Image: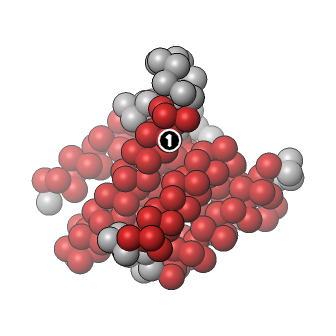
Amino acid sequence: MKRVLASAAVMAAVLASASATEQTEALLQSALQMVGRASSTSEVLTLNLTNLLILLVLKALIFGFGLFSVGGAGRSSDVPSIFDMPSTTEMHAGMCFAMWGSGDEDKMECIQRNSCEDPATADSYLQAGKMWYQIHKIMKLMPFEEKYESLMLKVKEAADYGSSGLTCSDMYSF
């Protein structure tokens, strides 16, 4: 229970530093749902930690690809760092992904909305997911469930919608 309260305190501090927007309010609501679910059963917490591990591996893949794709030109300010503070959209999408991965199918639209709001970040995660899928097909060492294939398609669809310049709130809700 101490961990849950500590997580809630950290999340509250991060959210207090952000400006009050529709996205921040949705992030706070998802954070409260996640903390509530994490304190209810240990199975949900275990699934969320598994999904968190997947997100961290994907972030590391994105970082590695960004580091080596520039031809070793050295460190610059536009190269993403694993130590950069994630954006509000990225944190919200991560929490929605963790809850979706643990069985809350309603969070798919939340993932799509965040993908629509920040298509560049969604494309980065989508690229990392495709790399994960290719590794799975070639080596069969890393698990890749069918539900993640449908997730990749829906994220791509939402990112394309967001890139088109249309209003994301018309198509997706939090």
Percent x, y for residue 104? 46, 77
Which residue, given by chain and number where applicable, does mark 1 sit on?
65
The residue sitting at 55% across, 35% down in the picture is 69
Q: Which colouring convention does the figure follow? A: secondary structure
Q: Give the left or right position of residue 69, taking residue 165 as reference.
A: left
Percent x, y for residue 49? 28, 63
Q: Quadrant of residue 144?
A: bottom left
Q: Give the left or right position of residue 67, taking residue 166 as reference.
A: left
The answer to whether residue 2 is visible is: yes
Above or below, 130 against 125 in this view is below
Above or below, 61 against 106 in this view is above
Above or below, 144 against 93 in this view is below
Q: Using a 10 Å C-alpha cutoff, classify the residue at mark 1 as few (fewer than 14 neighbours), some (14 to 19) or many (20 or more).
A: some
Of the 4 image quadrants, the one containing the N terminus is bottom left
Q: Which element type, helix, strand or loop, lies under badge 1?
A: helix
Q: Amino acid at mark 1?
A: Phe
Residues 29 and 109: in front is 109
The residue sitting at 86% across, 47% down in the picture is 165
The residue sitting at 44% across, 30% down in the picture is 81
Q: Quadrant of residue 107?
A: bottom right
The residue sitting at 47% across, 74% down in the picture is 137
Percent x, y for residue 56? 36, 51
Percent x, y for residue 111? 58, 62
The answer to whether residue 101 is visible is: no
Of the 4 image quadrants, the one containing the C terminus is bottom right
Q: How many marks?
A: 1
